[in-house]
Amino acid sequence: MLACSPQRRVRELLSAKTGTVRLPGGTILLDAGIALPDGAHDLTINGNSTTLRASDSFHGAAVLSCHNCRRIAIRGLSIDGNRSRLERPIGLPPSGQTFASFYSNNGLLFTDSTEVTIENVVFREIPSFAILVSGAHGVYIDHVTIADSGSNSPGGHNNTTGGILLEEGATGFDIRHCALHSIRGNGIWTHSRQARNADGAIAGNTIQEVGRDAIQVGHATRVQVAGNHGLRIGYPVSEIDVESLATPVGIDTAGNVDASVYEGNRLEEVNGKCIDLDGFHDGAVRYNICINRSQAEDYPWGQFGIVMNNSNPQMESRNVVIEDNSMLGAKFGGIFVIGSGNIVRGNRLDRINLAHCPENSAHFGCSFPAQPGVLESGIYLGSRGERSAPARGNIVEKNVIRGWRMKTRCIGFAPGVRAADNTIRANECSDE
């Protein structure tokens, strides 16, 4: 009797609905994705120096996928998505469609599942997402490596893919000690159209060379982003999604995000914003370090250091603590504040306004008529983000601000925003 092919043997092994599966060693070519049995439970899949590689004719939602699984663990294997042969230009999904139903050629895909563990798995050359989890509870991702992944839009720029995405109300998630390198889209992020993602941690990860955001917390509550290291965010410049004006961000926020903490992260060489708080409220941003060592010309998409905004109508920019952060080098201003009840305290801002606005306006386009002075201020109390939200009842104290003409432009105010309506005290301002 002829021995069955390695691909067929793997498919037979992974037809098990429960138990422990040990995969054969070596590289195994797959012509189509393998879907674990719907409802599989208490199933552990262990690699044995195993690489599952998509063939040149591969088709499927993912190399491995499972729907309605419970207590599934995948450990110790590699997945090669063969991006160089399988990548096709594709844009972003329509607003009413999930990422899981829109993108094929993912690495691992889990939908409507519970207690999913992914440990010590290596991904390379994945055309879409290395890991995509949609509508799941209890997701543990640890010591995962992802390199050279993600695809582009028809316009030739990133379409968000390449990294780890949890979407559609994922809860109880923990993503730790992962290493991501050369990701075209976002590194690690959450997203949801309706139900918020909740009760998660993104901690101790290293994310280097991404075209979009290193980390994004999208439409979520009670999320901790701590101790991550981002390096070269918004590079290469050719990958930036210019069609969507998607400015790269070290730690980004989207939707409605509250009761969350961004703490102790180190972000270096950010060609965009260091921390974007669009939708963030009733939370804390503290002990983060942002470092840009070069000059304004080297950050064509460079913007503010920390920015508040209120695009989502379900939230108001309020009760945010921005405390004890350190920023070395911002193309324009340091911290942009709107709303009320916010505390900006004890931050150290150096080399602010590398663009030398407004004196260098001809070169960098320093004009922002709606809120004049915003681009050249160390800390700016604004009148609005996406919606009106005049800065009132905020505390700005004990900050050290140094940079281009910061002695006189240290703290700025939008028209209609008064210093007397906020508490401004004990800030140290000097030129650099």
Image: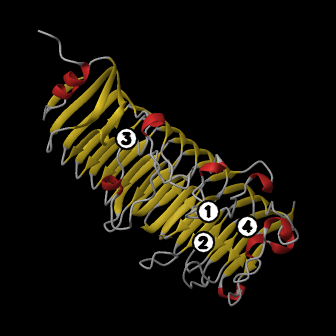
In this rendering, which labeled residue sits more in front, label 3 or label 1? 3
Which secondary structure lies at badge 2? strand
Q: Which residue is mark 1?
A: 323
Q: Which residue is mark 3?
A: 141
Placement of 216 over or under 109, stated as above or below: below
Which residue is at the front of the view, 362 or 397?
Answer: 362
In terms of image quadrants, where is residue 63? Answer: top left
Q: Is residue 426 visible?
A: no
Residue at image coords 82%, 67%: 429
* Mark 4 crowd level (few <14, some 14–19, many ≥20, 10 Å Cα): many
Q: How much space separates mark 3 and mark 4, taking CA atoms?
A: 36 Å
Which secondary structure lies at badge 3? strand
Which residue is at the front of the view, 286 or 432?
Answer: 432
- Of pointers 4 and 1, the one earlier in the residue sequence: 1
Q: Position of residue 256 (x, y in %)?
A: 43, 70
The kind of residue tagged 3 is Ile
Q: How much space separates mark 4 and mark 1, taking CA atoms?
A: 17 Å
Q: Position of residue 48 (x, y in %)?
A: 31, 19
Q: Which residue is mark 4?
A: 333
Left or right, 367 with respect to 308, comes to right
Residue at image coords 76%, 48%: 293
The quadrant of the rendering that contains the N terminus is top left
Q: Is residue 25 visible?
A: yes
Asked whether disc 2 touches disc 4, contact meaning CB atoms under 8 Å apart, the reply is no
